[in-house]
Amino acid sequence: MGLKRAAGHRYYVHGMDMAHRVINMAATARLVVQMTPQEKRTLDSRAKRVGLATAEFVRRRLNASDDIGDHREEIEAMLTALEITAPQVLRAVDTAMASIEAISAKLDSMKSETPS
């Protein structure tokens, strides 16, 4: 039986029957971080929202890629597209709102003209 390292702290145990089993190695280092009670509540809340213990949430966030840095070009392209299309979208919303107001006024006038 051999122990082979995989990603992170996971090791695969290979037996005679070639079955694979994952063993999570215990974390042995401790880090104490000072934060305000509100920051702690926020951290706990974010971890709970994704169904993780706070320590596991922090570990996963540390191992996650730098989302903005890794996708900067894509984000900048989307922001540029938003800058270009935002005025068109706002004009379309204004036009739609004006149409809704006109239809609403017409319906109100039709109601008042209808005999009871």
Image: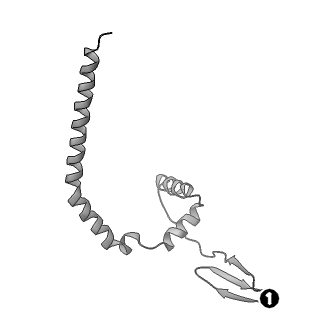
Any part of residue 32 in sight = no
Q: Quadrant of the C terminus?
A: top left
Report x, y in % for residue 13.
72, 84
Closer to the camera in the image, 43 or 28: 43
Residue furthest out toward the top: 116
Any part of residue 41 in sight = yes
Question: Quarter-wise, where is residue 23 in the image?
Answer: bottom right
Q: Residues within 10 Å of mark 1 (few under 14, many from 20)?
A: few
Question: Quarter-wise, where is residue 100 in the image?
Answer: top left
Read off the residue under disc 1. 16
Report x, y in % for residue 28.
63, 76
Compared to 103, does 56 lie above or below? Answer: below
Report x, y in % for residue 74.
32, 70
Closer to the camera in the image, 92 or 18: 92
Residue at 45% across, 74% down: 65
2 relative position to 45: left or right? right
Q: Quadrant of the N terminus?
A: bottom right
Closer to the camera in the image, 101 or 81: 101
Residue at 25% across, 31% down: 103
90 relative position to 13: left or right? left
Residue at 53% across, 69% down: 60
Residue furthest out toward the right: 16
Compared to 56, does 42 lie above or below? Answer: above
38 relative position to 29: left or right? left
Q: Mark 1: which secondary structure? A: loop
Question: Quarter-wise, where is residue 22 in the image?
Answer: bottom right
Compared to 3, does 47 lie above or below? Answer: above
